[in-house]
Image: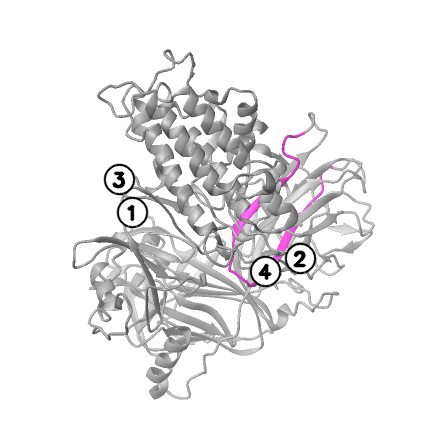
Amino acid sequence: MESILHLLFLLQLLPLLSSLESYNPQVKYFINCGSASPVDLVGPRNFVGDKNSNPSFSVGKNNSVQNENPFPGISPLYHTARIDTKIFRYMLNINQTGSYLVRLHFFPFSFKNTHLADALFNVSASNFSLLSNFSVRKSSTEFPVIKEFFLTIAEGNFDIYFIPADETRFAFINAIEAILLPPNFFIDDLTAIPPLQTKDGALRTLYRINVGGQEVSDTLWRNWVPDDDYLTFPSSVTTSSYDGELQESHQGRLVVTKIASDAVYKTCKYVSIYNNGPSNFPNITWHFNVSKEARHLVRLHVCDFFSPSPGTVKFYLNISPNFSEVINPNSDGFSEMRIPLFYDYVVSSDDSGYMSFSIAPNDNSIKKVAFLNGLEIMEFVGNSTFEVPVEDETRKHLALMIGSAGGRSPSLTTERIENASIVTNLNLKLKMSLAEILVATENFNPKLLIGEGGFGKVYKGTLESGMKVAVKRSDSSHGQGLPDYCHEGLEMILVYKFMEKGTLRDNLYDRKECLKNPSAETEFTWKQRLEICIGSAKGLHYLHTGPDGGIFHRDVKSTNILLDEHYVAKVADFGLSQSGMFDLDNISTSLKGSFGYLDPEYFRTLQLTNKSDVYSFGVILLEVLCARPPIVNSKQREEINLAEWGMFWQKEGQLEKIIDPLLVGHINRNSLRKFGEITEKCLKPQGADRPNMLDVCWDLEYALQLQQTLAHREAHEDSTTTAASTDLALPPMQNLSYNMFPVDDYSDTTTSAVFSQLRVNDSR
């Protein structure tokens, strides 16, 4: 059963806790690892060097290293580190039981012939696996990587173990913080199914968002970052702020409020139905990447400074995609306004790897407004398999045991894999051995990395024969169930013919030089585009007509159509594909696909057919014609969704108004007419009214013949009949007030009839 969410924890509001704004933690540990000198940070926080004896903590015998060439402006806290190829630990003397915030600071730098970015290790504390197969990329050398956790720690010794992944690796740490939290920062004795039990668990911070505000810090030195990067439609929302005082009590009782800074509660983003007229965007949506199939604690922060009186505002909260409830800041009978509150939920993510939150006005609310002030997402940490070593002599054995139990890291560095390159050809009757692949990719040289998808990272390689290939290496966190080309040990690798021209989307959108000089002849001609569409259609037809009902691709989009050096198209990426043989698996409670391409009938019925691929292909046809993404951020609602926009102009008989400017003067009117008809058929609302892919192939072939038959016989291969000679005026594409989303699979969304596409939980 593909359970999307489990929302198990309701509103927390108890007369227990006063403001965090004035909270001053009495128990706190700040350790500057590998140094004898103290470092003061703003706050104030005084990090003491661990080389000096200190009654509050101790560290075993291991190595300390110093940054030989520190970057200007980098805090002295990151000039040193504690490092070892064996297990080492920090032992903190905890004198008060309670919930603690623990931060681990990592900053990779070079010393001698070693770079800390080559470290690969695990971190364990209180029987929890805080970090597993952890490494810090060399690209993080400008800013430290800080990992934050919440744990309940009993009085006594609190040990943090740093465990190299195997005997060839090492672990390091630059700084450690442990801060006692206010009482009841997490509450377990409320009704929940099952109980939250945070006091017996551990949490890792993923996101801490100041909605509507700037980056701020609170008295626990937690950073709250702006929400703009996570908004689906940033231009559709309004920011508001409040300059007055916030309430801290109700009828003389202190309440569980202000778990965030005042600055968080005094800003928000909101959407209103009737203020300044109806809104084109009746909701606000945020999207976040999260771990797959993991439990998360989600904390929402609200402060109602909109209501003229208590009880006049309530709004909907939706969490991706099948949970909805009404948020009423005055549901507990508060008579005062501007009281900061927070709501906690336990959310179990599915296998899509993302989570979305939406708020929308409630029609039954007196004042129809929805707002949010802050948002936190924390992941529950799993139990550790690490066993505390009895004596130092066991360190090496334990390190090897843990390294094998954790599995090989999917992000092994070049130095690590060089040891594997001497692997002999084991003659496992595979098409290609791991040793051959390592040679072809220069041991998975990061310089040869050309992409990353749902299965894993993709490297460019060259075989001994000179053939260029694309090598797709499995990421253990992305279980796609795809057949492997090479499977030796823990390595799962796919090898494809290298497609020199990349994806269809890249060729459609990345044409800045041509746009700078519109008079220049474009090599990506209308004839080539038609041939690419025909080749792709034939590929889908082949899938659909195979034995046992064929195969449904389920993720047809322009990034999954690859082009070789001759612009010959191949359909790729079958991570979501499904057998066409009818069974109950074809009816699912979980939508799979990509935003902007999803068949609306599939969304309504949850029944998958080959006509769902046909609809997605219709969106691609419009992409090819218009050279724009399926979803854009536009102030004009009708322009947001390409399928709707294109069909509007097709029905008006003016499809030429939205074609790619590079095609103006190079496309025949009859070819365009036929192409528009094909596209309209593919995008029919009902699957039964759509053609099969064989019919689409025939119609596209006919559109190509029309283009070639009426072409001028000029030197340029595709200088076809011009607008003047065919009585077809093709104006340049109108200047549109939209911004293209980044070309990734999480940003293709819409709020129209295909608003359902915001709810896809397996977009890749």
The percent coordinates of residue 428 (x first, y second) are 28, 74
Q: Mark 1 belongs to which amino acid?
A: Met
Q: Is residue 571 above or below residue 624?
A: below
Q: In this rendering, is residue 34 above or below 576?
A: below
Measured Cα–Cα span from mark 2 to mark 1:
48 Å
Earlier sequence position, callout 1 versus callout 4: 1
Q: Nearer the viewer, residue 749 or 557?
A: 557
N-terminal-most mark, 1 or 3: 1
The residue identified by callout 2 is 344
Query: Please, what is the three-letter code of the amino acid marked with disc 2?
Result: Asp
What residue is disc 4 on? 585
Q: Of the residues under marks 2 and 3, which one precedes in the sequence?
A: 2
Q: What's the residue type where badge 4 is placed?
A: Asp
134 or 244, nearer to the observer:
134
Question: CB of mark 1 within 8 Å of CB of mark 3?
Answer: no
Identify the residue position indicated by label 3 in the image. Answer: 566
The N terminus, quarter of image: bottom right
Residue 80 horizontal/vertical position (percent): 32, 63
Q: Would residue 638 appear left or right of 572 to someone viewing this image?
A: right
The residues bearing labels 4 and 2 have C-alpha atoms spaced at a distance of 34 Å
Identify the amino acid type marked 3. His
Within 10 Å of disc 3 (Cα), the crowding (few <14, some 14-19, many 20+) is few
